[in-house]
Amino acid sequence: MELSLKKISGSRAEVLFKIPKDEFKKFKEKAISVFSQEVKKEGFRPGKAPKELIEKEVGEIAILEEAVKLLVEENLPKLILENKVELLSQPEIEALKPTDIRNDFFEFKTSFFIFPEVRLPDYKKIASQAKRKKVIIEDKEIDDALHWIQKSRAKLTLKNKPAEKGDFIEIDFSSPQIEEGLKRKDGFILGEGQFVSGFEENLIGMMNGQGKEFSLKFPENHPKKEMAGKNFDFKVKINSVQRAELPEINDEWARDLGNFKDLASFRNNIEEGLAMEKDIIEGQRIKQEIMTKLGEKIDAETPELLIEREKNIMLDGFRAKIDEVIKMPFEEYLAKIKKSEKDIKDSFDEEAKRRVKYDLILREISIKEKINVSDGEIKEEVSRILKNFSVDKVKELDLEKLKLYIESEIRKEKTLKFLEKLSL
């Protein structure tokens, strides 16, 4: 038998099989044996019916396809190993017909996606050139955190008077110029909701159940460029107005919040928490900087198969966010914004390509650095994830696919941490 592997592109390959007709017979016999266990013929026990009856019942093409499948399963793994390529997809066997058996040989092709070659630059040098910024916590940040906690502990009392600054209000609001008029809910202390200038001022004096429509011009320096300097119409309804009584910030209040000696120790605890949070954010910034620089140095092919998979993952995440945040069926949301699922999925194209490219880079580095994931790490993460699912949902999951996904994610994170440490 002759087997030859040829790369069609950086991420796709094909194998030509050329096998003597006599040698191929044994695979046909195996195929007939497989079908004989499945096909029930009256008067014969499973596997005992004459092969002529099986061939007539199943058909020549089906037997040919099964024989080729068995041949590929037996011979392809060794060829893949010898050529040092890794499969990304199951082999696709070209359409077969009986006339493919010509003279003394039988020929056919199978193709599949493979991991593309990634030629890494000096990634250690690139990572070491990314420098961490010193984490500094200002007094104002601690004060802001204290006031946020103070507001979260406010005593709320329903009032039947017009809303004033300092009241806690709950609203429904929408704008035809934002997300096709999708209605949103929010609750905040009036005057501190951090809406665009003029929005909260329009709510002062409104009563429970009252509605109002008004227009606002967004500032020219608005962070979202598509909104800067433009006029927006708003429709708002007040669902509740509540008087907010804020607790006094002092030692007693701090002690009531937890195991704190006084307000000073509580402030120290907040400072430590803010420092940890900023350190995590700085770590994420460093990782992103390293990956951006590596991505600029590498021109790796991004397989369409992986891009499509990533877009599906992003779509699932987006669907879950709509359900969690907006609390609206996804189909209803699509109808509201006048878009199709394909429109949403296509909008992820560039980001999916970037993610796939970065994943390929991290995968190659993990191979070079022998970064592995233990069974214990996978088991621990699987257990953590499954706690969020009902028993019925767990039964629906493909646990083997979940394990492979988790292994990949843990390896990526470990590789990113390896790169991050080089920047210290």
Image (spheres, rainbow, N blue to C red):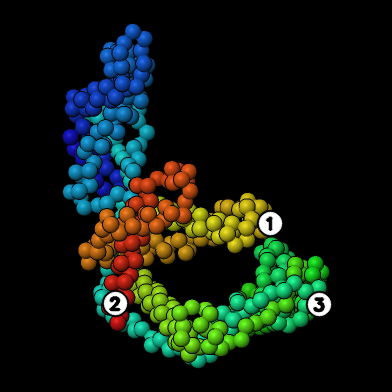
Amino acid under disc 2: Lys
Percent position of residue 45, x then y: 30, 13
Q: CA distance from mark 3 to mark 2?
A: 56 Å
Q: Crowding at label 3, few (<14), some or many (≥20) Cα neighbours within 10 Å?
A: some
Percent position of residue 367, x then y: 24, 62
Determine whether 228 is above or below 391 in the image: below
* SS for dot 2: helix
Comparing 87 with 194, the one in front is 194
Percent position of residue 253, x then y: 56, 83
Q: Of tags 1 and 3, which is closer to the observer?
A: 3
Q: Of tags 2 and 1, which is closer to the observer?
A: 2
Looking at the rendered image, the quarter that the C terminus falls into is bottom left
Q: Would you name the residue on which mark 1 appears?
A: 336
Query: Quick check: can you spot residue 371?
Result: yes
Query: Quick check: can you spot residue 338?
Result: no
Q: Crowding at label 1, few (<14), some or many (≥20) Cα neighbours within 10 Å?
A: some
* Residue at the spot 61% in from the left edge and 86% down from the top edge: 248
Comparing 112 with 204, the one in front is 204
Determine whether 136 is above or below 30 in the image: below
Looking at the rendered image, the quarter that the N terminus falls into is top left
* Residue at the spot 63% in from the left edge and 52% down from the top edge: 329
Amino acid under disc 3: Pro
Taking 342 as reference, is 274 left or right? left
Q: Would you name the residue on which mark 2 appears?
A: 421
Q: Residue 162: give its label.
A: 3
* Residue at the spot 36% in from the left edge and 19% down from the top edge: 39
**Residue 381, quarter of the rendered image:** bottom left
**Residue 359, quarter of the rendered image:** bottom left
Amino acid under disc 1: Lys
